[in-house]
Image (cartoon, rainbow, N blue to C red):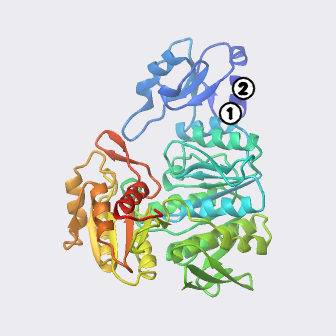
Amino acid sequence: MQLSDLISKTKIYSLSKLDPTHLDSLTIAGISCDSRQIENNYIFVALPGVEQDGHAYIEDAIDAGAIAILCKPDTKLPDTIIHLGAEDLRRGYTDICAAFWPGRAAMQVAVTGTNGKTSTVEYLRQIWQRLNWPAASIGTLGARTALENAPGELAGFSIGGLTTPSAEMLFSSINSLAKKGVTHIALEASSHGISQDRLTGLPIHVAVFTNLSQDHLDFHEDMDRYFAAKAKLFHEQLMAAGYAVINIDTSWGVRLADSLETTSVVVVRVGRDPKADISITEIKSIGPFLQLEVCVFGTKLTYAVALSGMFQVENAVLAATAAHVGGVPLHDAFGALPNLRPTPGRMQPVHGHPDKARIVIDYAHTPDALETALQALRAETDNRLYVVFGCGGDRDRTKRPLMGAAAARLADKIIITDDNPRSESPADIRAEIMTACPDAEEIFPRDKAINNAISRLQPGDSLMIAGKGHETVQQIGTETLPFDDAAVARFAIERLGGGDA
C-alpha cells in the first residue's frame, strides 16, 4: 500500500517537511511496534508503555529499514525519515493497522468478561464449524480454524501470547483468515485490549459479556474502572443495531444490560432468571453428562452436554445464543450443544488414573474462577477434593489470599505451589496465598506438587490443577521454561501404572 493511500484512509498525518508527492512514491511493506520485527519499508510505531517506551528504539527501527515513524510530535528524526503523527498514538496505531490489513469476516463476534472468554469463543467456533461455515476463533489459545483438507483438525498459529493480540497481529490475522475464506470469527476481548484501543476500527456484530469478578486491578485500580473497560466494547465497538448477549446472573451483567436500553443495540439477556430471554432452568448431572434445560425465547429445550462443570454449560449457552442472533437457526445453534468438545485447559480431563480418580486441568487464576471450578468439581466428587494451585508474580497481589480462602472453603486437601512467579520471590507469593489457608501444604516446584497430589488419589477422589490451563511454559525470573500441567499429570499417571493415560 502507498503511504499516501494509508494516510488518506486514516486520521494519522505527516509532520515531515518533504514534498507531499514524495509520499506517493513510498510503498509500505509492513507495520510494527516492535523494532525487532522491522524490515525494509516498514512503519515503526513508537508506543509509550508501562515498562518500556518505543521512542527508545526508534534508532534501531531505522537501522532495520523503517522509512516512516509514528511517534510524538516533538521527536527528532532524520530528514530522510517520514514523521507521522496522531492525536492519540495507540488509536493511530490501530487506525493504520486496520487500514493496512482491510480484510474482514462477514460475522465478527467479540466476547469479554473476567472468566469464560476462551471457552465461549471456542464453543462458538465449533457451532459454526458444525454447519460447515468457515470459522475461526482468536484469543488465548491463538488463532484456530479447521483445515480445508482435514475438517477434523485445527490449524492454529500464535498471535503473540496475549488474550487480545496487538493491533498489527489482530488485523493481520483477521485479514489472513478472510483471504483464506473464513467468514465467521469469534475473538476474545480483554479489558487491556479494549482499554488500549486494539479493537478500534473492527466492526463487531455481536458482543458477549460472560461475567465480572476481581482481576487486573493492578491495571484498572478498582472494579468500577474494570467494568467501564468491559462496557466500552458494547458502547463504542458494537455496531449500531448489533446484538449484546449478556449474562445477567451478576449485578454487573444487569448493570451493563440496563445501560444499553436507550441505545440502538439489541440486548439479549441470558441467565438463570426466569425473566431472561434465554433462561437456564436447570443443569444437573446424569452419569458422565450434564443435562441442560433451557427456555429460548419461550421455546423449552433439553440437551445432554458432555462438558465438565455447570459454568462451562453456561458458557456454551452464551455461545449458542451468539450463534443464533448471528444468523444460525435456533435448533441448529442449540442443537450443537451435545457435540461440543472441551476447550484445552478449561475443565480439561486427564484420564487413566489406576484408581479411576478424576483429574481436571483448569485455567482458573482468579478467586471467582477458582471457586466456580472447585464448586463444579465438588458436585462430581464422591470422596476427597484436592487442589493444586499458585498465583502469578507481577500481577494483582490482592487476589492471592482471596484464592487461598476459596480453596479453604471448598477443597479437602490444598497444595500451594508456583505458577508464573516472574520477577517476584516464589516463596513470598506462596506465603501470601497461605495467609488465608494456613493448613495447606506447600510443595514446590510445580511438577513435584502435581506428582505428589496424583500419587495420593484414591477411588472417588478428584484433583483440580488450577492456574495455568493450556499454557505450555512457566515464567521464572527472566526465563521462560517449558511446562505443561496436562503433560506432567499424564506422566505421573503412567508412573502409577495407568494404562490409558
Q: Name the spot of residue 495 as percent of width and height, x first.
A: 34, 60
Q: Which residue is mark 2?
A: 1
Q: Amino acid at mark 1?
A: Phe
Q: How many marks?
A: 2
> Is label 1 in contact with label 2 (beta carbons under 8 Å)?
yes
Q: Which residue is mark 1?
A: 100
Q: Residues within 10 Å of mark 1 (few under 14, many from 20)?
A: many
SS assignment at label 2 = loop
Which residue is found at the position 45% from the left and 60% from the top?
A: 225
Q: Nearer the viewer, residue 215 or 172?
A: 172
Relative to residue 449, is residue 8 depicted above or below? above
Mark closer to the chain start, 1 or 2: 2
Picture quadrant where residue 323 is located = bottom right
Q: Amino acid at mark 2?
A: Met
Relative to residue 366, is residue 51 depicted above or below? above
Q: Name the spot of residue 252 as percent of width and height, x first.
A: 51, 72
Residue 175 relative to residue 247: left or right: right
Q: CA distance from mark 1 to mark 2?
A: 7 Å
Q: Residues within 10 Å of mark 2 (few under 14, many from 20)?
A: some
Q: Name the spot of residue 101 as percent of width and height, x first.
A: 69, 36
SS assignment at label 1 = helix
Q: Name the spot of residue 403 as percent of width and height, x first.
A: 32, 68
Picture quadrant where residue 245 is located = bottom right
Which residue is found at the position 74% from the left and 68% from the top?
A: 325
Which residue is found at the position 68% from the left and 33% from the top?
A: 100
